[in-house]
Amino acid sequence: MTRTAWVEIDRSALRHNLAVARRHADGARVIAVIKANGYGHGLTRVAEQLRDADAFAVASVDEALRLRKAGFDHPIVLFAGVLDAEELALIADRDIEPVIHHRSQVELLARANLSSRFRVWLKLDTGMHRLGLDEEEFIRSYNELKKLSDVVSDIRLLSHLANADDRGDPLTERQLARFDAVTGGLCRQRSIANSGGLMGWPESAFEWVRPGLMLYGVSPFGDALGADLDLRPVMAFKTRVISIKALRAGDRVGYGGHFTAPADMRMAVIAAGYGDGYPRHVDPATEVLLNGAPARIIGRVSMDLICLDLSGHDDAKLGDEVTLWGPGLPVETVAAHAGTIPYELLCQVAERVRVHEL
């Protein structure tokens, strides 16, 4: 017997959300961020629907090579760059553009003994203090890369916004000003805007933008939902009712007996749990949609099963459809109940969950 839980992937929503990104980009070219297996939606599945993007971005060499093997010929930006000569050789002649964020990567290119020439992205740390070079190292590295014309065919410049999801945080303005001041006289092929920057800070567009989360229909802002921004959810996570039980007042439900029936009541058990990627630590107010209407989760989420209060669902029966998140129940809402972010929920949907493409 196969697992009952499944996800539905709305391919048209991906294309719609890319069009929204283009509207906000105001003429800038679009790098579609499809790392982490397309944010849990399937790397090549997402790439197929985003063919109108000007480039793709991934986190690892493996992801980049999977795209090439699948026949995608877009330029691919490799966010983490390469670690050693072996990885550099793997991306040679494949139009994969490594990000240079550490001095060792400049030195690696200087020692390279390959016939290939690489377009590279040099990363400036403008305030996130994660990957990227400080201003002095950045200028030094830029000048050294310019001299490596037998290895480096073109240099583009980028940085990353640390808190663009908070439209009231002045850090973003400071990062943008610093990025422009340092890079403006060097190059006019620059990128700093992620989804939050693109939708909340129009001046962040520069020449290239890098939408990620918004492509999957999710708001990058904590005070808005995707629907508020004309984004359409791409993933719907669903399952079915596999059992209905009658509880008596005082019956305790699930591991640890964290829920006690306050009166005689009916309960449904659905085939989904943290083994499928649904968050275990949701709060007691968390709901799903049972036949399109809210139903409250009771007891602990277990590996394979979740229990629901059937109050108000007198007609519920075996096989009824349950939406864990998707249209009508935004993943942003579920993430808030779980004390996490939508990125995590989308990326952790388990391999055993079946995928249906719409």
Image (cartoon, rainbow, N blue to C red):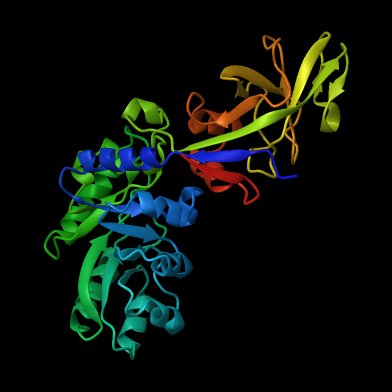
Q: Position of residue 208 (x, y in %)?
A: 22, 54
Residue farthest left in this picture: 185
The number of discs equals 0
Q: Is residue 306 left or right of residue 145?
A: right
Residue lying at 38% horizontally and 63% vertically, measured from the top left? 79
Q: Position of residue 6 (x, y in %)?
A: 60, 40
Residue lying at 38% horizontally and 76% vertically, measured from the top left? 91
Q: Position of residue 126 (x, y in %)?
A: 30, 55
Residues 256 and 349: in front is 349
Residue lying at 29% horizontally and 58% vertically, measured from the top left? 55
Residues 198 and 11: in front is 11
Q: Is residue 159 left or right of residue 3?
A: left
Q: Is residue 284 left or right of residue 52?
A: right
- Placement of 199 over or under 95, stated as above or below: above
Residues 76 and 283: in front is 76
**Residue 294 falls in image quadrant:** top right
**Residue 106 falls in image quadrant:** bottom left
The answer to whether any part of residue 156 appears in the image is yes
Q: Position of residue 183 (x, y in %)?
A: 18, 61
Q: Quadrant of the N terminus?
A: top right
Residue farthest bottom in this picture: 113
The answer to whether any part of residue 127 appears in the image is no
Residue lying at 25% horizontally and 46% vertically, measured from the top left? 174
Q: Is residue 167 left or right of residue 207?
A: right
**Residue 260 falls in image quadrant:** top right
